[in-house]
Amino acid sequence: MRDSHMATSVPGPYRDEGARDDETGHGSSERGDFVAILGIVGSSDPISAGSAVTVLMGSRDFGAIVGLPETVAMPCPLDAAKHICDAARHALADSIQRAIDMRTPLVRPFPLNYGTDEVPWTARPWATLTPMNAGGGFSAVALRIDTRITDELDVVQQTDDTVLTTVPTETGDETWSLQRSLRALSAAYAAFSWKTDRDGRIGFISEGVTRILGYEPQEMYGHTPAEFMPRDEVLRINAGFTSFPHKLEMPMDLEHKFQRKDGGEVWVRVVMIPVFDPITGIRRGHHGLTIDISDRKEAEKALGATVARHYALFEAARDAIVILDLESGTVIEANRQATVVTCRALETLVNHDYRALFADSDLARLDRLLSTAAAESATIDDEFALRRPDGSLVPAALRATSVTVEGRPLIQLIVRTLEDRISYERQLRQERYSAQAANRSKTEFLANMSHELRTPLNAIIGFSEVLDQEMFGSLSDRQKDYVADILDSGRHLLEIINSILDLSKIEVGKFELAEHVIDIGETVGKCLALVRERAVASGVHLDRDIAASLPYLRADPVRIKQILLNLLSNAVKFTGKDGLVKTSAMLDTTSGEMLIEISDTGVGMTPEEIGRAMQPFTQVHGDRNRRFEGTGLGLSLAQRLCEQHGGSLEIASEPQVGTRAIIRLPCDRLISLGNVPAAPSDD
C-alpha cells in the first residue's frame, strides 16, 4: 500500500506557492480548483464518445493533474491524459452528454490514477460539469476539478495542517469510507462531520459537535443547521442560495456563525458535497465537515485592528508621508498631509509619477538618493525643491527610508517644507526667549526681596542676641526660651535668604569665589563638629576617613564648608536612629581629582526622586516631606557651588539602603606643598 498526498489549498495570501503534490508534481490551483473546457462530437456509443472527448483549453495545472504532457498543444484529445483510464474517459463522456441533455451542472467523482505499476493508487476528487452553448453536432462543457474533497479514501494519518496522507479503500462501500474519513478529520481538528437529507434535516452528526456547539448529537437530529444559527446569518446565506440556486448541486466551502447552546457564537468553516442518486441523478442530500475557525477569526480581527491603528497613525502624522514604488516609478500611498504639502488631490497623487513632484534640476540627484537608499537599505536625509501644480517651487527637507514589502523595493519619503521648519524654529526661539525672560524676572525678584528681607532680619537677630546675653537685665527661664526660639528662627531664615541670593548670583553669572589654600581634612572636621549635636540627638553615628598626605586645595573655604554642611545636614536628617553617616576624602588614582564622599544608611531615593531633589525649591514627594523640614535648596545649591569650582556633585541612592554624595574637585586645584598656611579661621 502506498501513501498519497492530496493537498488542500489555502486561499489568497495564505497560499504556499512552493507546495507541490507528492506524486503529480504540480501545484494546486487557488482553492483547490483545476479548470478546462472539454468538447465532444455527438455519439450514442459511449466507447466511441469516450475516444472523441477533446480538451479545447485548460489551465497549466489541469494538464498536470490529468497527466497531459507539457509538449502537447491544445486542443488535444483527452486520450493523451495518462492519469485518466479508458473506463473513466467513457464515463466522463457519458456524464458530459447527461449534463448537456439536462441543461444543468452535474457533479460526479473524477478518478485519477497515479503511482507505478508495482504500487498504483487512485485519487477521486470531485468534478463539476457545466454545459456551454455549442452547435453543429459539437457539444462543450466547462470542467472544474475540486481536489479538496475526495471520495472512497481512507484516512491513515495526518502529516501536517494542510495535507492528508491517504490510500484507496478496499471495501467498495463508498458511504462507509467517506464517513470514516470524515470521522478521522473530526478527531484531527476541532470539527464535526454530518449528513443531511434533501430538505436539509440532519440525519447524522458526529460527537465533535458537543465540543464546539455544546449540543449532544441526539438534540440536533431532525433539525436543519439553520435552526442553530443566528438569524442574520441565516438571511445572509439564504440570499446566496436564492441568487444562485445551482449552488446546492455543487460542492461548497463557506464560513458562517453558529449559536452555541450556552448562547455564545462560534465561527465555523463548512465544507460540503452533494450526494446524488446514482440512477436518477437527483440530489439526495449533503455530506459535510464543519471546522471551528474561531481562533483564525480572532487573529483576523486583531490583524484588522492593527492595520487600522497603523493607518490612523499614518494619516495623523504631522509630516507628509509618501510611499514610492521604484519599479513602476509611481506613488502607491500618501497620507492626508502629503496632499497639503504638494497641493495635489489624493487621486492625482497616488498611481502617478513621483518625479512630477520635484524640480527638474533636482531629478538626477533625487534618482541617486533613492537608488542609494534602496541599494544600501539605508535612511538618507537631503533637501529638494518641491514643484506644485502651479509651477512654483518650495524648498523641502526629505528623509528617504528603504523598505521591502513582499519582495518589492519601496521607499518611504517623509517630507517637511522648510517653510514649516523655519516657522517652527522661530517659534522655539520665541518660547526660549520668553522662558529666559521669565527666569530673569524671577531671579531679580528673589534677589530684591532677599535684600529687602535681610535689613529687618539682621535687626531682629541683633536684638535677639542682645536679649540672649541679658545685656539690659536678667530674663526669666520662659523669656530665655522665647528669645532662643526667635534667634534660631532668624538665623535659619537668614540662611535661606543667603542661599537664594547665592543661587540668583550664580544664575545671572555674578557669583565670585574668594579663594584660599585650605586643608580639606581640617574643613571636614569643623563641619562634623557643627552637625554632631544634631546627630547625637537623632541617635546617628558620625564617622570620618581622611586619606593621609592629601594635598592642599585652592578653593573658597566658606563655600566648601557650605557644600559639606548642606550634604551632612541632609544625611543626618534622613538617617534614622542607630544609622551611620560617614565622610571620606581621597584622591582618584585614575583622574587625579580629589574626591569627598558623604554616605549614609538613611531612607534613600529612587532615580526619579534624585532628579527632582537636584532642582531648586523642589523636595521629594511622599511621607518624607511631612516628616522632615527643608526648603529644597540644599542639594541644588551644593551642586552649583561645586560647578563654580570646576567640579561636580554626583548622587547615588537606593530606597531603604542609603545615599552616597560624591564631590569631585579638579586636579588643577590641588597644591602639593610641604607647608602651606591654611585659610584664615572663620570660627
Image (cartoon, grey):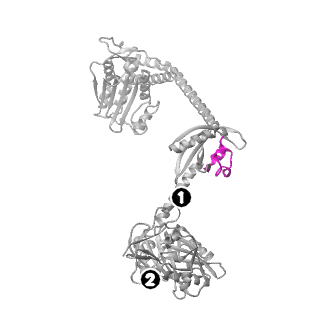
Q: Mark 1 or 2, which is nearer the eye?
A: 2
Q: Please rate how many residues cluster around mark 1, counting C-alpha atoms within 10 Å: few if below 14, some from 14 to 19, many from 20.
A: few
Mark 2 belongs to which amino acid? Thr
Percent position of residue 96, x then y:
57, 81
Indicate which disc, 1 or 2, sits on the residue closer to the N terminus. 2
Locate the C terminus and report the quarter of the image it occupies: top left
Q: Is residue 658 above or below residue 404?
A: above
Tell me which segment is drawn in magenta: 331-358
- Residue 304's disc number: 1
Neighbours of disc 2 within 10 Å: few (<14), some (14-19), many (20+): few
The residue closer to the viewer here, 448 or 197, is: 197
> Left or right: where does residue 164 sit relative to residue 133?
left
Q: Where is residue 372 in the image (x, y as percent from the top left)?
A: 54, 41
Q: In which quarter of the image is the N terminus?
A: bottom left
- Residue at the location (45% across, 70% down)? 24
Residue 201 appears in the figure: no
**What SS does tag 2 mark?**
helix
| Disc sitting over residue 353 in the figure | none
Q: Is residue 344 left or right of residue 404?
A: right
Q: Mark 2 points at which residue?
A: 175
For numbered disc 1, what is the local secondary structure? helix
Q: For the residue marked with disc 1, what is the amino acid?
A: Gly
Residue found at the far right of this picture: 390
Q: How many labels does the image show?
A: 2
The correct choice, above or below, for 309 with respect to 266 in the image is above
Can you give x and y, in whole percent of width and height, for residue 343 in the image?
68, 45
- Examine the rendered structure and indicate whether residue 326 appears above or below residue 177: above
C-alpha distance separating marks 1 and 2: 42 Å
Q: Is residue 122 left or right of residue 597?
A: right
Furthest residue toward left: 548
Quarter of the image where one finds residue 448: top right
